[in-house]
Amino acid sequence: MNTKVDLRPVSVERRTEGSGPRVLLLHGLAANDSVWERVLPELPPSYQVWTARLPWRTETIADWTEQPNLRGWLAKALDAVPGGAEVVVAHSMAANVLLDLLDQKNRGGVDALRQFGIRALVLVSPFYRGSTEEFDWGTISHYLNDFHLIMEEGIRAHSGGRVPDDIKQAMGERVRDRVGPYGWLRFFDLYLRTPALQTGRITAPALVLAGATDFAAPPEESAALAEALPDAIACVLPGSGHFPMLDEPAEFAAAVSTFVNSTMGLTPPRGAALLNALEPLA
């Protein structure tokens, strides 16, 4: 078995043999493409699914934090999918980097969606606030002093809750320390800039998926983002936290495939009624 760690800042891997649509899965901060392992078998076999390994992943997290241009790295991942990623599924901080990339391209006079060939977006547990007034010192204190809790949430979701609390806490603090102050600043800077996003120009159909018990990116923020986008729906997975693809992989995959098939005019998958059955975020 090849256990060599891939240290390239950005790489993509084709994970299924379907002929299309082309779906690219993007992981969040201090995670890697293993967050999608439970979802992959649940997606329709007709999909051509790719996963990306991004610079802020677990293995290389210490190497990216002083680099300011996260957008450029994400653009490389999008460009690396042959024919372009028609559907982009982005989790947590990756959703914010994606929105930042599309926004900055649009501001530069480029039709970002057309450039990358994106036809649909799935934004999972994104961080979003619609006005600068929604940020205050209490917000900064929460995300700074309790940042390790988000890392612990990832450990809980990956392990299915089997890691004892004391070990989970120690592991969460270790990951937080690897992210470090510069990594935290990159994350929070993206969050602070969400009120300035020109969301009205990001016109691709979008599904914004939230976990009901997500304390990191509350479901209300997904609702606000969906409201700000021209063509979006926000739904909540009732049994999930910040990592719905790990907490409820079958339900997650059904919601994504129902949305994608509806958006792209494909045959509805088995369980297609799930998206309508999910609790909407108003």
Image (cartoon, helix red, strand yellow):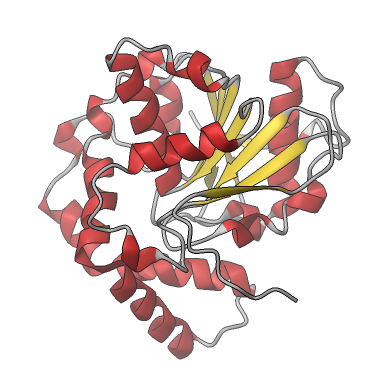
Horizontally, is 67 left or right of 17 in the view?
A: left
**Quadrant of res 4:** bottom right
- The answer, for residue 206, to whether it is visible in the render is yes
Examine the rendered structure and indicate whether residue 254 appears above or below residue 11: above
Estimate the x, y position of residue 185 in percent, counting from the top left: 21, 54
Residue 277 appearing in the image: no
Give the tally of numbered discs: 0
Q: Position of residue 71 (x, y in %)?
A: 35, 37
Q: Residue at x 59, y 23 (%)?
A: 120
* Foreground residue among 175 and 208: 175
Judged left or right of residue 64, residue 50 is right
Relative to 42, does residue 115 appear above or below in the rendering? Answer: above
Q: On the picture, is 90 further left or further right than 228?
A: right
Residue 152 horizontal/vertical position (percent): 44, 72
Residue at x-position 58% and y-position 67%: 157
Q: Quadrant of the N terminus?
A: bottom right
Residue at the (44%, 40%) spot, across then down:
74
* Relative image position of residue 264 (x, y in whole percent): 72, 17
Q: Nearer the viewer, residue 138 or 177?
A: 177
Between residues 153 and 81, which one lies in front from this camera angle?
81
